[in-house]
Image (cartoon, rainbow, N blue to C red):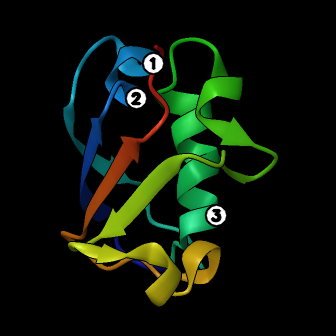
Amino acid sequence: MAAPLGLHLEFGGGAELLFDGVKNHHVVLPGQSDPWNMKQLLAWIRGNMLKERPELFMQGDTVRPGILVLINDADWELMGELEYQLQDQDNVVFISTLHGG
């Protein structure tokens, strides 16, 4: 079984409002038999952190269009998106590019 995984999560561009207005979170994901990936992280965030209006953050099992995801300062599209296997102390940033007018 894999050891627990420590991550730094950051929400910005208005996405933090869905998480009680808190931008920075240090989380420890429990150990499990398979390595954690982004798809599992998003499900964990939805079940454990998302306080309101999940439809503004997620669409199906991924982030909704308009939310930029960076893993260690790189666009997650370059990292494999949902299949990226998380590493201990990864920095994952979610930035909403959707703004009211």
SS assignment at label 2: helix
SS assignment at label 3: helix
Which residue is at the far front? 101
SS assignment at label 1: helix
Q: Which corner quadrant of the image does residue 12 belong to?
A: top left
Depth check: 28 or 82 in front?
A: 82
Q: Which corner quadrant of the image does residue 15 belong to?
A: top left
Labelled disc at residue 15: 2
User: Compared with residue 32, is residue 49 higher up or lower down, i.e. above or below?
Assistant: above
Label 3: which residue? 39
Label 1: which residue? 18
Q: Residue at x 76, y 52 (%)?
A: 61
Mark 2 crowdedness (10 Å alpha carbons): few <14, some 14-19, many ≥20: many
- The residues bearing labels 2 and 1 have C-alpha atoms spaced at a distance of 6 Å
Where residue 51 appears, as percent x and y from the top left, is 51, 14
Where residue 55 appears, as percent x and y from the top left, is 71, 26
User: Compared with residue 98, is residue 38 higher up or lower down, i.e. above or below?
Assistant: below
Q: Residue at x 64, y 47 (%)?
A: 43
Depth check: 12 or 10 in front?
A: 12
Please tell me whether mark 3 or mark 1 is closer to you in this view: 1
| Amino acid type, residue under disc 2 in the picture | Ala
Q: Circles 2 and 1: CB distance less than 8 Å? A: yes
Sequence-first disc among 3 and 1: 1
Mark 1 crowdedness (10 Å alpha carbons): few <14, some 14-19, many ≥20: some
| Amino acid type, residue under disc 1 in the picture | Leu
In this orientation, does residue 79 appear?
no
- Report whether 41 appears left or right of 7: right
Sequence-first disc among 2 and 3: 2
Q: Residue at x 51, y 30 (%)?
A: 48
Please tell me whether mark 2 or mark 3 is closer to you in this view: 2
